[in-house]
Amino acid sequence: MQRFALIGAGFIGSVHAANLAAHPGIDFRLVYDVDQQRAQNLAAAHGAAAAATLEEAFDASAIDAVFIASSTDTHAGHLRRAAAVGLAVLCEKPIDLDLDRARDTAAYAQECGVPVMVDFNRRFDRDYAELKRVVDSGGIGKVELIQLTSRGPSMPPLSYVAVSGGQMRDQTVHFFDLARWLSGLDPVEVFATGSALAEPGIAEYDDVDTSAVTLRLPGGALVQIDSVRRTGYGYDERIEIMGSDGMVEARRHRNGAVSRYSGTSVVDDGLHPGWFERVQPTYAAALAAFVAALESSAAPGPSLEDGLKAQAIAEAAVLSLRTGRMEPIKY
């Protein structure tokens, strides 16, 4: 049994708490949050205890691994603290919004030799795993074009936008990671353009809510990603990969499979109302993969390097938004 402490009892922390409590190979022991009442409530709901201090949550004599799901600005500090005492870490992205600090923190964790996984949970989507299998098997030949869509149903609060790092670092970064993972290649340059259409006020934070990004892969293959913060029809996420010998796609998910026929009209079930409903199963799958890696002494993935590379692409994309030019990606 892997003894876990959860750091962070907000919305995403509550998702992880349920998965930690449900996993048969986990002894879910502690929850820590700066809001003690929130930590106590979440811990009580899942048979864990609330840690009164960070020292208790990072006690290597009582804990084997920590799940870092606290606010973004605390990730790097918590990761360093866990690495220093030899605890395994599953960490929400990003390691830190500042790429240099993220690199320093990752280097420190690697020096300490602790297992660390970055929670790019979409890699554990069943359909995307099948895309990866088909591409790796040569089923569509050489990859030439990848198209990814990430369209959220509603704008997040501007208070969230202010601390999120912006669309490239917060939303599109998941698809930068998927592009690398699915193609098996590191993009060499990026062009990004965007607008503030859903919420003009987002421009005050030097951000956009509607964007199109083009990545160039080694050899000339292209990746296109469109990201939207607000749709009028639900959460829309899909991927298409075209190769020299064919194409494979993971279509948009509907919330049901019922079609209603009346006269000359056909009405189908719509899309999921939000991103969480679409990707919820991937969180438990990612946790299970992390625990399996710990039990087998395998290196968990996505790795710290994967996290840093996706973030490097995001930084180059942010620069391209500002310059209006294709920008090289500096890993």
Image (tube, helix red, strand yellow):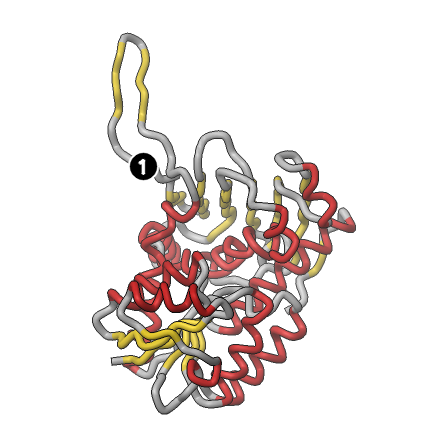
Tell me the residue at 38%/76% (across/down): 5
Could you say where residue 218 lies in the image, as x and y percent from the top left? 59, 59
The local secondary structure at tag 1 comes to loop
Which residue ends up furthest to the top in the rendered image?
263
Q: Is residue 276 left or right of residue 155?
A: left
Give the residue at x 38% y 80%.
65
Q: Amino acid at mark 1?
A: Asn
> Given the current orientation, which residue lies at the most extreme front position?
37
- Residue 19 picture location, percent across and down: 30, 63
x, y percent for residue 157 = 58, 46
Within the image, what quadrant is residue 198 found in? top right
- The front one of 129 and 231 is 231
Name above or below for residue 309 compared with residue 144.
below
Residue wearing tag 1: 255
Task: Give the camera-side residue of 40 and 113.
Answer: 40
At which x and y percent is residue 89?
43, 77
